[in-house]
Amino acid sequence: MPWNECKPMDERLRFMARLLEGEKMAPMCREFGISRVTGYKIFNRYKDSGLDGLNDRSRAPYRQANKLPFQIERSILGIKKQHPTWGARKIRDTLLKQFTMFKPPAISTVHAVLDRNGLVKRRKRRRYKVQGTTLIGANAPNGLWCADYKGEFMLGNK
């Protein structure tokens, strides 16, 4: 026996058709396996937008909360082009003077803009290797002893 394929749009249409015929919301939601909140949401979308309200909607955000305005980002890049040796801190201070009516971006945000546009050189970090004391070869058993100095610490007898 093949499974019945159902699409969300078809289920919403069936739900709305039965709801408009006069059936009660709670038993309908139980039968369709949705919460009453979801049932009322589908019903309100249908009231507001008609059949288009039953289509799937994009879940992508309308705007990005932390994205800088285009003008400020362009001015950051312009300041960096005028002064190639300046870093994020000086550029932010200059922005404070230019755009007094806007809240200035953080230094890390200015640095992120510069980094995104390839205007920041990344330095390679030097790795330091610890070198131990050289041990002299032992000629007999127990001829070589080594002790690690861990610092001063209090003993049980103070």
Image (spheres, grey):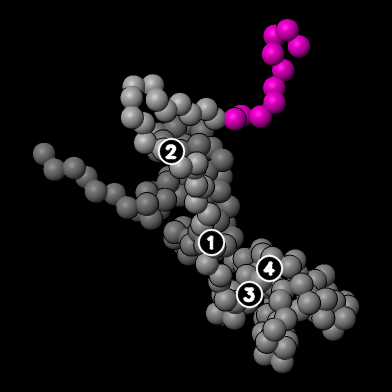
Residue 138 quadrant: top left
Residue 50 appears anywhere in the view: no
Magenta residues span 149-158
Q: How many angstroms separate mark 1 from mark 3 (CA)? A: 26 Å
Indicate which label's residue lies in the foreground, 2 or 4: 2
Residue wearing tag 1 = 126
- 97 is higher (above) or lower (below) than 23: below
Residue wearing tag 4 = 109
Viewer-proximal residue among 43 and 126: 126
Left or right of 37? Residue 11 is left
The N terminus lies in which quarter of the figure? Answer: top left
Mark 4 is surrounded, within 10 Å at the Cα level, by few (under 14), some (14 to 19) or many (20 or more) other residues, namely: some
Residue wearing tag 3 = 113
**Furthest-top residue in view?**
157
- Number of labels in the image equals 4
What is the x, y in percent for residue 121? 57, 76
Q: How many angstroms separate mark 2 from mark 4 (CA)? A: 51 Å
What is the x, y in percent for residue 2? 13, 43
